[in-house]
Amino acid sequence: MKGFDPKFKDFPDYIVGITKEIWEDRGIATLHRYYSDDIVVRSPGSVVLGNQNVIAATMATLSEFPDRQLFGEDVIWSGTPEEGMLSSHRILSTATHGGDGVYGLASGRKLSYRILADCHAINNQINDEWLIRDQGAIVRQMGLEPQAYARDLIAREGGPERCIQPLTPKTDQPGPYQGQGNTNEWGQRHADILTRIMGADMAAIEQTYDRGAQMEYPGGRTGHSFGDADRFWMGLRASFPNASFTLHHQIGRDDPMMPPRSALRWSLWGKHDGWGAFGAPSGAEVYILGISHAEFGALVGGQPKLRREWSLFDETSVWKQIALQTG
C-alpha cells in the first residue's frame, strides 16, 4: 500500500493491526503516528477534535477498563492508498470494569459489546472518523437502563447547560473525507433495502432477508428471522416517523474467502413524535447516527438474500437528547 508502513499486508491488516497496537499493546503514543493532529472523531455522544483529545480519551477508557480487548470481526472498505481509503470496522470488545470513570465506581463487571467505526486513512494516518459503541449493551451489563444512565450522565457532567452535547448537525464538525463509498452491487442492494424500510415499506424485510437470517442490534440484542428484524426497524422508525432519513455512505465488497458484504452509514434527524422503541412521544428533536453491516448469500440457488446483519446506534445518546429538551 503506497504511503503506508510496509509491515501491513493490506488495508484490513492496517486497521486491525493498529487497533491492537494502540489498545491492547498499550501503544497509546503511536496515535501520534497513526492519527493526524487535527483529526475529527464523531461519536453519538460527542465530537472530539484533535489527536491530543483522542489520546486523553483513550487513556481514560483504559484506566476504567484495563483488560480491554478488541476483536476485529470485519473491515469493509473502499478507496485507494493514493486517494485515501475508508474502512468500516466491526469490533467485538470484552472488558472488565476495573476502574472508576464515566460509568461510575469500579464494579468488576465483565462486559461484551460491539463497536462499528468508519475511518478515513491516507499516508499511514487516520484523519476522519465516525465511531459508534453499543452504549445500550454496556450500561445494561452495568445493571442500568439507557434512559436512567443518560439522565445521570447529564447531572454528573454539570447539568443541561454544562454537559457534553451529543452529535447533531448543529454540533458536527467538517473533516477532510468527502467520499460516498463505491458502487458495488452489494452495497447498492443493502442501500435499497434500508431505504425501503425507512420509507415504511416493511414488506421489504420478508422479501429481502433470508428466513434464517441472524441480526445483531443495539443493546447487545441478537435476533433471528423476519419478526425480530421487523420489531427492531419498526420500533425505531415508529418513534421518529417524520424524521429525515439520509444515507451518507455505502460500500459493497466481493473478496476471496468472504461472503458478499456491505457497510452503510446513515442518520435520522427529526422529532420524537411517535410511539415506538423510545416510549411516549416527547417532541424532542433527535439526531441518530447509525452504521449497518450485512452479509449476503444464496442458500437457495439463484436467490441471494441478506443472511447476517449488524446495525448499531447509541440508545443513551437518544435518551440524552430527549432529556435535555424535556427536563
Image (tube, rainbow, N blue to C red):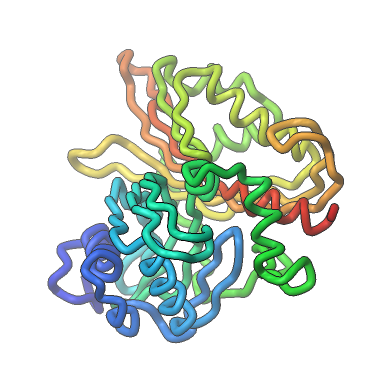
Task: Look at the image and tell me in which quarter the N terminus lies.
Answer: bottom left
Q: Left or right? Give the position of 135 relative to 26.
A: right
Is there any visible trace of residue 150 in the rendered image? yes
Whether 207 is drawn above or below 279: the answer is: above
Percent across and percent down for residue 214 are 41, 26
Q: What's the residue at 35%, 75% (across, down)?
A: 122
Task: Look at the image and tell me in which quarter the C terminus lies.
Answer: bottom right
Of the pair 181 and 212, the residue shown nearer to us: 212
Q: Quadrant of residue 123?
A: bottom left
Q: What's the residue at 65%, 69% (across, down)?
A: 172
Of the pair 276 and 75, the residue shown nearer to us: 276
Of the pair 12 and 95, the residue shown nearer to us: 95
Percent across and percent down for residue 124 are 29, 77
Whether 307 is drawn above or below 30: the answer is: above
Percent across and percent down for residue 128 are 47, 71
Whether 197 is drawn above or below 247: the answer is: above
Q: What's the residue at 48%, 48% (across, down)?
A: 138
Percent across and percent down for residue 88 are 40, 54
